[in-house]
Structure formats: C-alpha cells, structure tokens
Image (tube, rainbow, N blue to C red):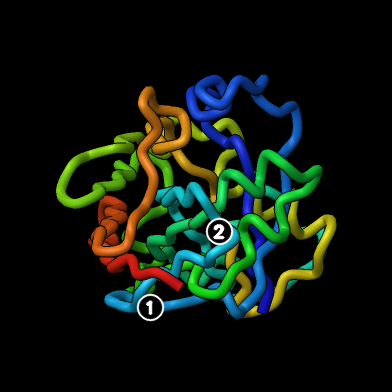
C-alpha cells in the first residue's frame, strides 16, 4: 500500500507556516512503518526536538485505477478515515525534503472505522479537529481544502497507479503547535485526539523513544 500525503492544502495552514498556497498539490509520502491504530503510542524519537500532530481526513482507495477522471473519482474511494500526520518539525525545516521528518515509526495514527462515500459524499463540509490533552489546537473544515478530494484522487492517480488500500491524506487545517507563539510540541504523557466529523475520534498517547 501507499500512504500519499498532501501538504499545505489549507490556505490558512500554509499562511501560518509562512508559505504561499500551492498552485498544484504538494505530494509527499509515508511508509507502512508509520502506521498505528487507535490507542497505540506515538513514540518521540531522540532525534526530534519538536514533534507536531496534524489532524487530517484520509481517503482510502477501494477500486484501483490510473489517470482517473475527476468525475469518476468517488467510485474509486472505498471510504474515509481519520489520520494524524505526525511530524518532527526540527528535521522537516532543516532538510530539503520531508521523508525523514514524517517517516519515523508510529508517525501515522489511523482510525479503524472506514466510513463509506454513501455517508460522507465527496468529503466536503467535514469539521476536522485536533485536541492536545483536551485543549483544541486545530479546528477546521474540509470546505476550506484548496484541492478537493475528487481532484486529489484524479491528480494523484496521474502519478501513481492507485490500488485498493492506498491512502491519501488530504492536508491539515491551521493551528498546529509549531506555528503558535509560544510553540506547542508533543511531550511524553500527552494524549492527542484527532476528530473528523462523521468518522469519530482517533486518540493516541505520546511516549518517549
């Protein structure tokens, strides 16, 4: 399977990081070693001095395809999950690409529930929230995605042949800890919650590596 991530897909999130909104989707990837489930621990590696959580709507491919038309994209989606694109910011902004910063073991918590297109449609209009120890950090809505779910499925399939089980993480709304003053990072003993409307709450404790 592939874990395909879209960066800076909310204009306000791009702005809080000092970046211009992308004119085309910014694609990066994670590997299967990053995946954990609800209740599993996010492990902070010793190399990371600032680890952030990122609340995201994830699309799971049900029917594979290559060069999928946007109009047909929903028929290729098996359903939606809640995801957390955990990121080591000190590494992300020290290197020219993000593979190491986003690729540590446990850095992609994923909900168990697969909610079908028949319930959530094209994924628009869904509230996306991150809470850290009960405090709301991120609170956005997928209506604010720069690139919609159908567009992303089509665009990504022009690069990669999509296969059943592949994931597309659609981006994160503003409010991440790195962009705050003072900055807020994950610490051992914390509890991170990602809630996506219509899917539920994904909760993960944080431990030291």
Q: Is residue 145 above or below residue 171?
A: above
Disc number for residue 74: 2
Q: Is 208 or 23 nearer to us in this picture?
A: 208
Residue 16 horizontal side relative to residue 182, left or right: right
Label 2 crowd (10 A; few <14 / some 14-19 / many >=20): many
According to the picture, the residue beneath numbered tag 1 turns out to be 37
Visible residue check, residue 71: no
Q: Give whichever of 160, 34 is nearer the camera.
A: 34
Q: Is residue 192 above or below residue 19?
A: below
Quarter of image, res 117: bottom left
Looking at the picture, how far across and down is residue 23, in whole percent? 74, 27
Asked if residue 116 lies left or right of residue 162, the reply is: left
Quarter of the image where the N terminus is located: bottom right
Q: Earlier in the sequence, mark 1 or mark 2?
A: 1
Q: Name the residue at 41% across, 37% down.
A: 176
**Residue 107 visible in the shown view:** yes
Query: Image point 29% across, 61% down: which residue?
Result: 199
- What element does badge 2 sit on? helix
Task: Residue 69 in the image: state x and y as whole percent.
Answer: 74, 52
* Numbered badge on residue 113: none
Q: State which quadrant residue 136 falls in.
A: top left
Q: Position of residue 200 (x, y in %)?
A: 24, 61
Q: Residues within 10 Å of mark 1 (few under 14, many from 20)?
A: some
Residue 172 coordinates in the image, percent (x, y): 48, 42
Helix, strand or loop for disc 1: loop
Q: Quadrant of the rendered structure where residue 46 is? A: bottom right
Q: How many numbered callouts?
A: 2
**Badges 1 and 2: C-beta atoms under 8 Å apart?**
no
Q: Which residue is drawn at the image coordinates 61% and 78% (left, top)?
A: 32
**Mark 1–mark 2 distance (CA, rounded to whole Å):** 25 Å
In front of the other: label 1 or label 2?
1
2 on left or right of 107: right
């Amino acid at each position: 399977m592939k874990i395909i991530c879209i960066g800076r897909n909310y204009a306000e999130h791009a702005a809080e990081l000092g970046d211009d909104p992308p004119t085309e989707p910014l694609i990066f990837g994670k590997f299967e070693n990053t995946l954990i489930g609800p209740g599993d621990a996010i492990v902070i590696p010793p190399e990371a001095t600032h680890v952030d959580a990122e609340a995201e709507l994830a699309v799971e491919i049900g029917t594979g395809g290559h060069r999928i038309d946007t109009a047909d994209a929903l028929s290729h989606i098996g359903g939606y999950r809640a995801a957390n694109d955990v990121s080591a910011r000190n590494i992300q902004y020290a290197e020219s690409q993000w593979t190491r910063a986003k690729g540590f073991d446990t850095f992609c918590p994923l909900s168990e529930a697969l909610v079908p297109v028949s319930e959530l449609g094209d994924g628009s209009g869904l509230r996306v929230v991150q809470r850290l120890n009960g405090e709301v950090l991120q609170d956005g809505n997928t209506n604010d995605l720069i690139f919609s779910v159908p567009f992303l499925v089509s665009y990504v399939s022009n690069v990669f042949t999509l296969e059943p089980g592949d994931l597309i993480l659609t981006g994160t709304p503003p409010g991440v800890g790195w962009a705050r003053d003072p900055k807020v990072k994950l610490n051992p003993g914390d509890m991170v919650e990602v809630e996506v409307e219509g899917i539920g709450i994904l909760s993960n404790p944080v431990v030291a590596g």
